Amino acid sequence: MTEILVGLGTFIALLITVSFYRILVGPTLYDRLLGVGAIGTYAVILLALIGFIFDRPSGFLDLAITYAILNFVGVVAIAKFLDLETAQGQATQSEGPQEWAAEDVSEQEEPA
Amino acid sequence: MTLMDWASLPFLFAGAFFLFVSAAGLIRLPDFFSRAHAVGKSETLGSFLILVGLILHHGLVLESGKLLLITLFIAITNPTGIHTLTRAALRAGQDIWIQPQDRGRRAKEVQATADDSPAPTGGGS
């Protein structure tokens, strides 16, 4: 069973390596942030698998919980910050999911 | 290999498959919103399946409670984070990718829907 878990962990590490492509060459800032969030979730699963591979799951699962919380907070905070920046850029209040469609969405270039 | 190990194997392999689908979508799909769709759904399901497989492998002790906590947390927060990110991108006026044969026909419709840039060029990656 340990061999299967090691193989699975290697596969997920490979997926993390492949996902760095989107962070490095992602055309927009949002693509890069999406890659960061995806790699964070992969890392949570990899931490849980490493805990079971080394037969010490308790401490590694605590690390995985912490990493999941920090990943979520980081992604939501940066996304909210970018949203706020957009709202300040078009100098109008846009709260609520219905009102954005009626407004004039400004054409600001994303920092790529 | 006990019986519970055999029971956990399909969950682990199905989870690995869905994580692979998620990474392939993150690399290959043409615009931000389709990539966000691939990551938000497929990665949540894949991590859910792998953690359930680990719970079956380990049995009912304190660690499986922690695994269940991680499973519920990822199942709630991963789509929430991707949704917040996608809403920020939509408000910032990201280009929406359209099928090449539909570009002329659907340009007006997409403009009316998303109030997006006038020429939905979209295109490769």
Image (tube, helix red, strand yellow):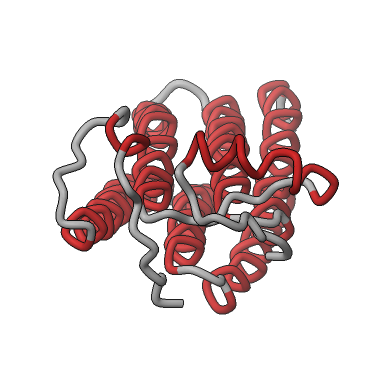
Expressed as whole percent of the image width and height from the top left, the position of residue A46 reads: 53, 55
Expressed as whole percent of the image width and height from the top left, the position of residue A1 reads: 71, 43
- In the figure, residue B2 lies in which quadrant? top right
Figure check: B12 above or below A6 = above
Q: Which residue is drawn at 39% across and 76% down?
A: A111
Figure check: B12 above or below A50 = above
Classify residue A16 as left or right of residue A7.
left
Residue found at the far right of this picture: B101
Q: Nearer the viewer, residue A82 or A22?
A: A82
Q: Can residue A6 be seen in this view?
A: no
Classify residue B24 as left or right of residue B65.
right
Q: Is residue A94 visible?
A: yes
Classify residue A5 as left or right of residue A59.
right
Q: Which residue is drawn at 36% across and 26% down?
A: B65
Expressed as whole percent of the image width and height from the top left, the position of residue B85 reads: 38, 49
Q: Which of B125 and B48 is in front in this view?
A: B125
Figure check: B124 above or below B23 = below
Expressed as whole percent of the image width and height from the top left, the position of residue B99 reads: 78, 46
- In the figure, residue B8 lies in which quadrant? top right
Q: Which of B54 and A41 is in front in this view?
A: A41
Classify residue A111 as left or right of residue B19.
left
Q: Which residue is drawn at 53% across and 53% down?
A: A42
Q: Which residue is drawn at 47% across and 50% down?
A: A41
